[in-house]
Every structure is written in structure tokens, then in C-alpha cells.
């Protein structure tokens, strides 16, 4: 999956000058907190993508996306970028943004590989642009600090994504500390880190990531519909607040007070967004206290709210959650980030062999190949040595 060094050498005949590991983003709580200026709790996964770059000839940028088995090229001068839903737009805009900052660029040979190289468009755009900016800053010694790279990446993502990007996602990619969770405040833009208390012991339990293998396209339209509904709901709620009220501080009772003006659907969406923000705050406190049982309980609440409050339901993911929860030492399981790429976080100590048998049954029923693995909160963007830590 991640043999970006060998792919680059095979494609261009030389070793890359820089290889960047771009982690995958995992939003545990507060997926829609930006709409209420609330809180979110995030971490990163080791399954993201990798970008290798070397200087090329002339003024041409050659790019191979090994995961998608596609090759493209474009000229550095006169770059035209469109919101066309194609991964190459992310590479183009990253190069364009560095040029706009006043830095001259040589020709470039670029290789991209990994799970997030073939994900839904907006997720891939954030990962590729952030990784490209980070890689070019290192390879060409541009001297950009973290704040400047975040600004450039965010501006680039804003120019090409289909929807407004989340600043917290860019911040997390550049800032995340290994074996920590990031707690983000949408109102202030501030963030803090919480150490991971899951040590795999019988008392604390461990973390596992269960990948359903369900493509985003299966539930993509429903997911997009929910995002649109949430954004619209909170726009209607905002004008009803007094100048001294903060949306994230509203209670469900206060929202329902406006049920006549808002309607049932708006109340439902607003309730989920506000409760998610509160769950992020509560989960952060549970982690700080090392109370993994309380964290698991909050995660279970989120899973229930996804279907009962938000109306999101995917039978494949629901089946896997139930099979995981049936295991004796599992504390909780829940879809994360509304199941982006069909991921489920499992809290507790999983009997791997027993779960493998369940996954065989799952594949027989649904015809998707699922995988389960230990999960450790990962680091942010980093320069690596070639194919370090290859995942086969």
C-alpha cells in the first residue's frame, strides 16, 4: 500500500528527495461542531497517504497516483485549477499556492500512494494539499513555519474543495502529537492535547479500528444530505438567538422552545450538533481522568444518536458494531466521522481470532472485505526515510 519509494524509483528512475507521511484524520466527536462554534475531539490514523517528490526537468510537474493507477502532468506556468472532483486539482493548487507566495519552483516528479489517495474528493484534497505544502517546504528549504503552512494549505483547500474546509482538520494534520488526542475549540481556534490512556490492560482496555470495506459511494449521498441539512438547520437557528447567547451553550430544551418557528427537522439536526459538541467536551474530561469506561459510554451515546437523532443508518456498519459489542471484553463500538471510509472505533480488548470469524461471516453476507487492527493515535505530518513502516 505504502511502497511510495519503490514506485517513485520505478516511475522516474531516481530516488525521491523527500517523502512525507500524511496521516488519516479521525473525528471522534464533534463532526459538525463548526456549525455551532463548539468543540471536537480528534486524532490521526497511520492509514493516510504518502507523497514522494524529486526535482524534474524543465517546467513540468509529472504526477503518478499509484493507488488509482493514474498518471498526469501539467506545466508550472499558467496553472488552471477547477473544482472538478479530480485528485490532480489538489496537486495543482498546492504548486500554485507556493508560487503565489513568491517562491520559484523547478520541475517536479511526484508520487502519491495510500488509502486516502482514493477517498472522497474533499478528504483527499485536504490530505494532498497539506502534504504537498509540507514536502515542498522541506525539500526546497522555503523556511515556512507551521502557522504559515497551515495558512497556505487552508487557503488552497478553500479554493478547490466543494464545501468550506474545516480549519481544525488542517491544524490537526500539522499539529498532532503521537499517542495523543486533539481537543479543538471552534470559537477561539485554540486546541490542546490529551494523552491516550488506553494501554491495552484489562482495566483500561485498548483501541481497535474496524474497517468495513464499504466504499464511500454506498452511503455518500446520505452523508452529503445530512451535512447540507445540518448547515441549513443552524442557519435558521442563529437569528433566533439574542446577542448575548452562544449557540454551543444552548440546551435541547431551549432549542425545542422554538419548535414552531423551526420545525421538526431543524430541531433534530440542531440537537445532534449541540449534543455532539457536549460529548466532545465530556469525552476529553474522561480521557484526562483516565476513565476509559466513561469514554466508552459517551462513544455508545454517539452511536445511538447517529441513527436515532440524525437518521443515519448503514446496515453493514451496524452489523459489524453489533458483532463487536457481543464480545465479552468490548466496552463500546461506534462509527467515526459518520463512517468516512466505513471506519468503526472499537473500545476494549477484542478477541482477534473470534472477530476474524465474524468478519468471514460479514463478507459472506454483504460481499465486502472487512479488516480489524490495533489502533494507536498517530502523529501529524512528518518527513520519513523512504518506505519506513511499510504496511502490506
Image: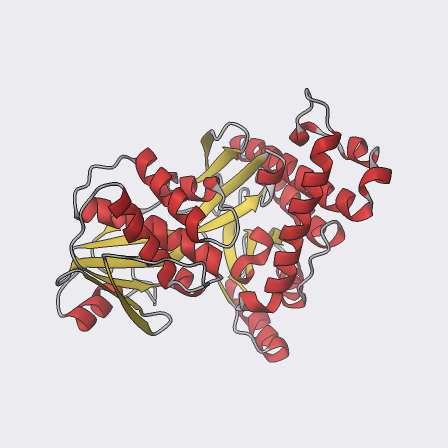
Residue lying at the far right of the rendered structure: 260
Q: Quadrant of residue 145?
A: top left
Residue lying at the far top of the rendered structure: 244
How many badges with numbers are in the image? Answer: 0
- Front position in the image: 275 or 363: 275
Q: Quadrant of residue 91?
A: bottom left
Identity of the residue drawn at 50% across and 35% down: 183
Identity of the residue drawn at 27% across and 57% down: 78
Q: Is residue 292 left or right of residue 70?
A: right
Identity of the residue drawn at 71% across and 51% down: 310
Q: Is residue 297 left or right of residue 85?
A: right
Q: Position of residue 268 (x, y in %)?
A: 76, 46
- Front position in the image: 391 or 51: 51
Q: Quadrant of the C terminus?
A: bottom left
Is residue 242 positioned above or below 261 on the image? above
Q: Position of residue 4 (x, y in %)?
A: 26, 64
- Front position in the image: 291 or 313: 313
Is residue 121 positioned above or below 22 on the image? below
Residue 275 makes an appearance in the image: no
- Front position in the image: 177 or 131: 131
Residue 125 makes an appearance in the image: yes
Q: Position of residue 230 (x, y in %)?
A: 67, 47
Q: Position of residue 118 (x, y in %)?
A: 42, 65
Amino acid at each position: 500500500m505504502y511502497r511510495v519509494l519503490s514506485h517513485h524509483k520505478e516511475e522516474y528512475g531516481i530516488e525521491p528527495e523527500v517523502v512525507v507521511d500524511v496521516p488519516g484524520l479521525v473525528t471522534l466527536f464533534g463532526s459538525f461542531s463548526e456549525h455551532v462554534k463548539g468543540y471536537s475531539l480528534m486524532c490521526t490514523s497511520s492509514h493516510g497517504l504518502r507523497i514522494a517528490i524529486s526535482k524534474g526537468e524543465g517546467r513540468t510537474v509529472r504526477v503518478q497516483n499509484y493507488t488509482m493507477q493514474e498518471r498526469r502532468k501539467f506545466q508550472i506556468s499558467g496553472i488552471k485549477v477547477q473544482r472538478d472532483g479530480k485528485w490532480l486539482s489538489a496537486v495543482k493548487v498546492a504548486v500554485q499556492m507556493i508560487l503565489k507566495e513568491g517562491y520559484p519552483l523547478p520541475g517536479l516528479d511526484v508520487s502519491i500512494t495510500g488509502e486516502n489517495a482514493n477517498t472522497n474528493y474533499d478528504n483527499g484534497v485536504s490530505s494532498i494539499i497539506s502534504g504537498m505544502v509540507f514536502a515542498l517546504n522541506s525539500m526546497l528549504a522555503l523556511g515556512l513555519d507551521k502557522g504559515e503552512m497551515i495558512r497556505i494549505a487552508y487557503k488552497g483547500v478553500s479554493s478547490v474543495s466543494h464545501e468550506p474546509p474545516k480549519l481544525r482538520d488542517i491544524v490537526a494534520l500539522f499539529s498532532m502529537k503521537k499517542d495523543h488526542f486533539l481537543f479543538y475549540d471552534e470559537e477561539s481556534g485554540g486546541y490542546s492535547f490529551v494523552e491516550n490512556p488506553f494501554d491495552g490492560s484489562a482495566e483500561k482496555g485498548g483501541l481497535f479500528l474496524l474497517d468495513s470495506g464499504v466504499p464511500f459511494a454506498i452511503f455518500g449521498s446520505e452523508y452529503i444530505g445530512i451535512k447540507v441539512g445540518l448547515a441549513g438547520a443552524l442557519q435558521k437557528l442563529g437569528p433566533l438567538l439574542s446577542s448575548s447567547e452562544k449557540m454551543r451553550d444552548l440546551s435541547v430544551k431551549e432549542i425545542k422552545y422554538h419548535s414552531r418557528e423551526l420545525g421538526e427537522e431543524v430541531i433534530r439536526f440542531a440537537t445532534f450538533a449541540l449534543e455532539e459538541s457536549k460529548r466532545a467536551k465530556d469525552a476529553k474530561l474522561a480521557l484526562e481522568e483516565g476513565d476509559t469506561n466513561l469514554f466508552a459510554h459517551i462513544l455508545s451515546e454517539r452511536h445511538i444518536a447517529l441513527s436515532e437523532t440524525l437518521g443515519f443508518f448503514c446496515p453493514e456498519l451496524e452489523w459489524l458494531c453489533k458483532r463487536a459489542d457481543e464480545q465479552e471484553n468490548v466496552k463500546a463500538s461506534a462509527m467515526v466521522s459518520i463512517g468516512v471510509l466505513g471506519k468503526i472505533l472499537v473500545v476494549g480488548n477484542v478477541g482477534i481470532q473470534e472477530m476474524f470469524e465474524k468478519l468471514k461471516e460479514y463478507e459472506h453476507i454483504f460481499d465486502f472485505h472487512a479488516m480489524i487492527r490495533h489502533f494507536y493515535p498517530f502523529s501529524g505530518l512528518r518527513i520519513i526515510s523512504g518506505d519506513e513502516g511499510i504496511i502490506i
